[in-house]
Image (spheres, helix red, strand yellow):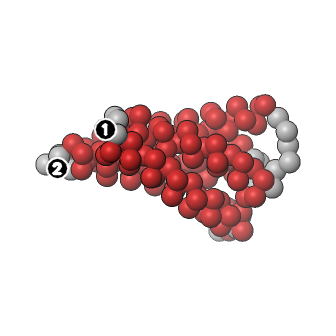
Amino acid sequence: MKKTQQLLDVTFWKFVLVGIANTLVGTTVMFVAYNALHLSYWISSASNYVIGSIVSYFLNKYFTFQNKEKSVKQVVIFIFNITICYLLAYGFAKPIISWVLSNQSKPVQDNLSMLAGMGAFVVFNYLGQRIFVFKK
């Protein structure tokens, strides 16, 4: 129980606030790229994380985790974390949602896959940033 309380402390709620800001920007980019620009699932969802990750790095580093370290290594670990979380979240979401919603159109499947991928990404990313990127 104590381990759970440590993961859900004030740092968690700051991460949630940063995530809301990132979600508003990134989700808009992703769905406009897919639905208005007709870019692929992978390009649309990746564009969300390229833009959102830049904002996320700086807000989480200085606001959420109050990390003052200046290091290229930390940036590399952050990029690695984001990449792994993205591939896991969206890699699992697409086939699962496509299977569950096999009777729906491809745009419905892809849009719901992107939403499911976002949810999975948040969980993976929080744990990765807290445990590996900005650990104390």
Coordinates of residue 42 in the picture (x, y in percent) = 39, 35
Q: Are marks 1 and 2 in contact (CB under 8 Å)?
A: no
User: Sequence-wise, which precedes: disc 1 or disc 2?
Assistant: 1
Instruction: Pick out the residue farthest to the left.
Output: 103
Q: Is residue 23 visible?
A: yes
Q: Label 2: which residue?
A: 104
Q: What secondary structure is found at the residue carrying circle 2?
A: loop
Residue visible at 75% across and 58% down? Answer: 63
Instruction: Pick out the residue farthest to the front.
Output: 36
Disc 1 crowd, CA 10 A, few/some/many (<14, 14-19, 20+): few
> For residue 65, what is the image quadrant?
bottom right
Residue visible at 58% across and 59% down? Answer: 21
Q: Is residue 50 above or below residue 4?
A: above
Residue visible at 72% across and 68% down? Answer: 10
Residue closest to the eye, 136 or 22: 22
Q: Amino acid at mark 1?
A: His
Coordinates of residue 12 in the picture (x, y in percent) = 66, 63
